[in-house]
Amino acid sequence: MSLGDPVATASDRAGMPTEVHRQRLFLGSCVALIATSVSFATVGAIMLALKREFVLTNAEVGWIGGAALWGFAVSQLVFAPLADTLGMRALLRMSFLGHLVGPLIMIFAPGFTTLFVGALVIAMANGLVEAACNPLVATLYPDDKTVKLNQFHVWFPGGAVLGGLAAFGLDTVGVEAWQVKLGLVLLPTLAYGVMMLGETFPATEGRDAGVSVREMFGAAFGTPLMWVLLIAMTMTASVEIGPNRWVPAVVEAGGMPGILVLVWISGIMAVLRLFAGPIVHALSPTGILLASAVVTGIGLASMSYATSGGATIAAATVFAVGICYIWPTMLGVVSERVPRSGALGLGLMGTVGMATVGLVTAPAMGAVADRFTHERLPVSETAMLLEDFAAQALAAETAGPDVGAAITEIEGVRRATPGGGGVEGGLTAATELPSPQTATALRAIIAADAAPWAADAQALLGPADNYGGRISFRYLVPLCWVLMAIFGVLWWRDRSAGGYRATRIEAG
């Protein structure tokens, strides 16, 4: 049977004249994943712009980036168990609506709260795509799940490449508005809506085999291996997705085009996933996971020390090789080793992974970045800049419309400065400045775009932001050590048993 041939389903065998076009559904799923990835890449690419325009702390930006992740988890948790009953096409219709509405909410957002809500809607749409398409791919290719899931997930980094290059191209021709970049999400959204929403979908593999909802929940929560994989997923998602959310902002703060580094990472991931078949067969899924944990740890540590352009690219390359197979291979192992967990098992993996990154890893990385950014700011130079701006910017002819907001932030620094600040006092006498208020005030000066203070503020804040972000990568390395132990045991058990073996779901 060729990829373009219709696939027989249980409905066909029951006498219903239903025809499922496997290739069209697979390609449509890939385009839907491109929409997910473009939203992921563009939200990551505009984080520095949002930080400056809305005068946000690293922690607040972390919450926006986190909402784009744990919203994914919420929709996975709610809707993945319903893939059998509602049907995968219904889930994709809801994702289509979310991918249309979410970017528009962010584009017209007046501040942090609305940005947060828009990111959450986008993320829920992303989760719906995974809730529908992961079990769809497993159903369409029951004999080659891990390989096909890796090839399907080519288009997560592949979409990041497309979205990242488009965003960089807009910058190159002078279109720097982050709203335009976010609007790129609408293009693949419309494409997958046209390709898929009118198609006939098969029943999920579990429903086709007669697995009841009770059996599905029993397999998902009553299998020890499933619990091991869920625990591992909290860490694999953290070391893969957490750093990728921060890469553009961190690298850009260091003076490099951050979106191009993300494109480089994503391009490597896409190429390696495209040729996943021979790697999976040579190393086995558990062998791939073990090797990935080792290489990812090396990549994260390297990125935390990289200060030059060449070192950053080299470290990002190692990191990309480490993380490229993790997510789809984790899903493949669940689908092949705990097949009766069905769409619920796949959804739980996505839920646990994204919830951990959104609620814990991304905000924690932001908090670490805030701490080390502040430590790297020179107290005397920063204090002099803040005082000079407050004293002279209102009268400057080049003062932008946000100067008043910047001065308000400086007054907040004065109030919070221990031993010598005070609204009436001067910051230059202080031996310590408050965190994160000081970095926020510098961002407000940059956002005000008042010369020469904006350039001076960027010269102080950029290297500090880069340093803080790089240190946050280093804090994730111990998770890779734990993953090495978990996957090492699973790989050894497989080897002792004669090799990795997938389990085919049997009709109950």
Image: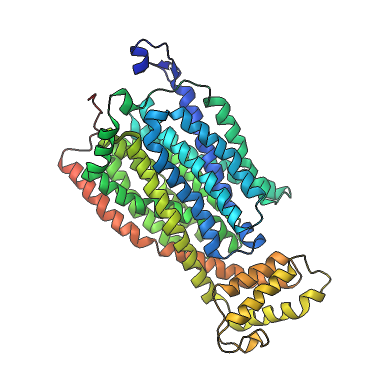
For this orientation, the residue located farthest to the right is: 397
Q: Is residue 387 visible?
A: yes
Residue 337 relative to residue 169: left or right: left
Does residue 505 sit above or below 120 in this rendering? Answer: above
Q: Is residue 133 left or right of residue 482?
A: right
Residue 26: % across, % down: 46, 27
Left-right relation of 366 to 346: right
Query: Based on the displayed image, in which of its 4 quarters is residue 145 positioned?
Result: top left
Q: Quadrant of residue 135?
A: top left
- Residue 146 against residue 354 in the figure, above or below: above
Identified at 55% across, 72% down, the residue is 436
Residue at 67% x, 82% y: name it.
384
Position in image of residue 209 (x %, y %)? 28, 24
Colour mapping: rainbow
Nearest the viewer among 213 and 244 is 213
x, y (%) of residue 327?
39, 44
Count of marks, rendered view: 0
